[in-house]
Amino acid sequence: MRALIAAATGLALAFAVVLTLTALGSPSGGTSPKPLLTTVPAHP
């Protein structure tokens, strides 16, 4: 019975965290206009 109560408590806590993060919304930011420049290593 304790395991069931612990599982229900953990599930409720996880659900509360998800709802809190959803209510806060995504951070206001943007993507960089510059592309990521990567180089390919030279083949020997």
Image: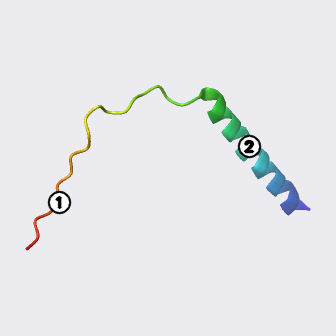
Q: Amino acid at mark 1?
A: Val
Dot 2 crowding, Cα within 10 Å, few <14, some 14–19, many 20+ = few
Q: Is residue 27 left or right of residue 16?
A: left
Q: Position of residue 19 (x, y in %)?
A: 70, 35
As drawn, the residue found furthest toward the bottom would be 44
* Residue 21 falls left or right of residue 10: left
Judged from the image, the secondary structure of the residue bearing numbered disc 1 is loop
Q: Residue at x 61, y 28 (%)?
A: 24
Circle 2: element type: helix
On the rendered image, what quadrant is the N terminus found in?
Answer: bottom right
Mark toward the viewer: 2 or 1: 1
> Amino acid under label 2?
Phe
Q: Position of residue 3 (x, y in %)?
A: 84, 62
Disc 2 to disc 1: CB gap under 8 Å = no
Pointer 2 or 1: first along the chain: 2
Tally the numbered discs. 2
Residue bearing the label numbered 2: 15
Residue 21 x, y percent position in the rendering:
62, 35
Distance between mark 2 and mark 1 Cα atoms: 44 Å
Q: Which residue is mark 1?
A: 40
Q: Name, please, the residue furthest toward the left.
A: 44
